[in-house]
Amino acid sequence: MSAATHRARRARKARHGGPVAWGFALPALIVYFVFLVYPALSSLWFSLTDWDGLSAAYNVVGVDNYKNMAADPVVRQAAINNLIWAVVTVVVPVVLGLALAVALNGKVRGKPVLRLIFYTPAVLPLVSVASIWGWLYNPQYGAINAFLRAVGLDSLAQPWLGQDSTALAATMVAAIWLRIGFPMLLYLAALQGISPDLYEAATVDGASRWQQFWHITMPGLRPAHYVVVALSVIDSFKVFDLIYAMTYGGPGTATQVMGTWMYFNVFQYNQAGYGTAIAVVITVVAIVVSIPYVRSQTKEHAI
Amino acid sequence: MIDNTFSRRRFLSLGGGAALAAGLAACTGTGSDDTATGGSGTGTKTLRLFTYEDNSTIDLLKAQIKQFDTQNGTTTTVDSLPGSGAAVYPDKLRTELLGGSGPDVWRIWGGQIGAPYVKAKQAMDLSKYYQKFGWDSKINQAAVSGMTFDGIKSGVPYIGAGIGVWYSKAAFAKAGIAAPPTSYAELEEANAKLVKSGITPAGLGGKYGWDIMRLFEYLLETSAGPDLHDKLLVGAETWDRPEVVTAFTNFKKWQDQKWLPDGAVGLDPADVELWYVQGKAAYTLTGQWTEAQGIQAGGKKSADFGVFAAPTAGQPLRHSGFVEGYMINAKAGNPDMAAALIDFLVKPESQKAVKVTSSVVTGAEPDKATLPLSYEWSQGPGRQPFYTIQDQALPKKQADQYFAIQSDVLQGKTSPADAAKKMQDVIKAWDKS
């Protein structure tokens, strides 16, 4: 065997791993295939059928379910709602989370307590969050309308969850409250990694706080931005539970998102084939959105 | 013609591969003999019952089932999902059945809510058990028809509930209402008096659609009359007609006149339905269960409340009603024992022990001393014919479209005339096959 062949083999082994490496990876791979790949392929298959979700038999209908989605007005509305949801519930919590992280990273009295307060909503069960906000929004007895009436803003008191015009925005407020803690925590961790020397040097050079933020803090948080934004975007496209518990997709279909509409079709309307087609579309969108994140992580580890 | 009908089993065998299937079976429990027999009843003496019995009565049910187990040497597990309503419980049941570990016996609503389980052959044909236990002669026949699907008796009725007006006597007295209204016009007058006295008349919430629907179906019964109402529900008459427009117009009037809570469309029925007990509303539209689970569970006396049938001009005076019953898993390991359990539960003494307020079993009428209002209902309006509650008359998809139209009307987004047209479109598109 030539030295060149031997080197090539060693390089291939280094890149793809040897039998021992594959042996170690095997249990995880089995779990991955059984619980992720196989169900995903099953879903893809069922999206090409008219399965009702209960019967043993079904017919293959090709891409009819996907064609029907194009003509479904609720899918259109749900997609728009998803888009609005994604933009608002990513941008607002990320910006507020960053602001809180920067504020709490400095010399603030009661820092641990404040961190706990801001992160607590993130650990609450979503159904509890939905109940809390449901009570706050109650048109007659809720705290929000009571406050508005108490300060003389009676005209602003609304049936927040009971009208199309405010229902989606009202659920997004709950989502923002819930999700601020996650970016705040990640940014706080990332801020610890920025050397204080950089700020000292910048201060000596006469840089203002604002300039320090833009030229030291923001570049220093770049890896955290990838993680926070990518995970928030993926999370926002998967939205289901908060909408389901707070509005049940209503009033009418005003707050339907792709996740809830998929659920209604699969589990309530006996249209599992159609609902699964919606699920496939949600998955494809989530994958496309997560590509930049995965690539950034791969690059980072490759360096 | 190419046969393009597949079964899930065939797909699994084609697509899964032996190793994957073995892995799945090992990891999830599917594909084993356990699944083939279904339910939890692989042994001849093990049963699982799934219900949505309320927290206030679940212990009574469990006590009865324990008695059955003692008599028969069985072990029956009872799982309950109380308060979830017809919007959630069927999903859980469906998921369990698809997961291969469905219950042996489950409680379900009749009509279009129970129908999918029969159509999918998940529920057993119980004809032979009807004969064996003589259920036809013991159980109200109207209720039996509510658990009969395309001629197949796949369920055994457990309760037959009627929707009436349950009200607070104090609220009526404060508003100067001396007696329950006997016509729709009188009900409107009563509403006006209640608003004037500072209380919301009807505590109804539209979050899931079905609660506020009880008002609309009453308004439709009032404007259309019994014959036309029945024909509308099966699509035998067009909805695009003056009687339906009148019902939608009155529906909007209830919101505009503040006879419903502000923003009723978004309110959760679980929060609103008991407002009449808590003094936040004068009445609600609900069934007999509210006496045990609402009034008495809330520490109030039945004597402080009353019930009457929502008044219409129709003869006979009908109310909305529905049936709930038990089904047996088509794959139950021991269907004979499951049927024996159901037979035990529909015996008059068992029904009385569980405090069933709306029994369909002869000899199990509500106890006059402990449930006076339920008894009053059973002896009066309960004896009158009823129309099928609309969320059981229509499949879930059509019912949700119906609710969406109602929501649009209440918000003023759709005119009553357009709502009637849209409703006709919904019914027209309903594939009854």
Image (cartoon, coloured by chain):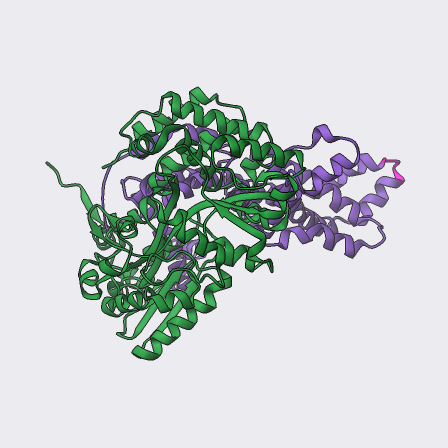
Chain colours: A purple, B green
Q: Is residue A300 left or right of residue B425?
A: right
Residue B112 vertical position relative to residue A252 in the rendered view, above or below = below
Query: Measured from the top left, where is residue A73 in percent x and y?
Result: 42, 27
Quadrant location of residue B397?
top left
- Examine the image and state in which quarter residue A219 appears: top right
In the image, residue B221 sits, relative to residue A143, either above or below, namely: above
Residue A115: give x, y in percent of width and height.
74, 53
Question: Is A202 in front, or is B394?
Answer: B394
Comparing B81 with A299, the one in front is: B81
Question: Is the N terminus of chain A in the top left, top right, bottom left or bottom right quadrant?
Answer: bottom left
Q: Is residue B257 magenta?
A: no
Q: Is residue B148 above or below residue B265?
A: below
Tally the marks.
Answer: 0
Q: State whether residue B139 appears in this view.
A: yes
Q: Magenta segment, principal secondary structure?
A: loop
B54 or B333: nearer the viewer: B54
Q: Residue furthest front?
A: B178
Q: Is A205 inside the magenta-drawn segment?
A: yes
Report the residue at 27% width, 40% height from top: A50
Residue B136 drawn at (x, y percent): 22, 58
> Does residue A24 appear to the left or right of A49 in the view shown?
right
Residue A87 makes an appearance in the image: no
Residue shown at 73% from the left, 31% from the top: A154
Residue that appears at 63% across and 41% down: A138
Q: Which residues are magenta?
A: A204-208
Residue A193 location, x and y as percent?
A: 72, 51
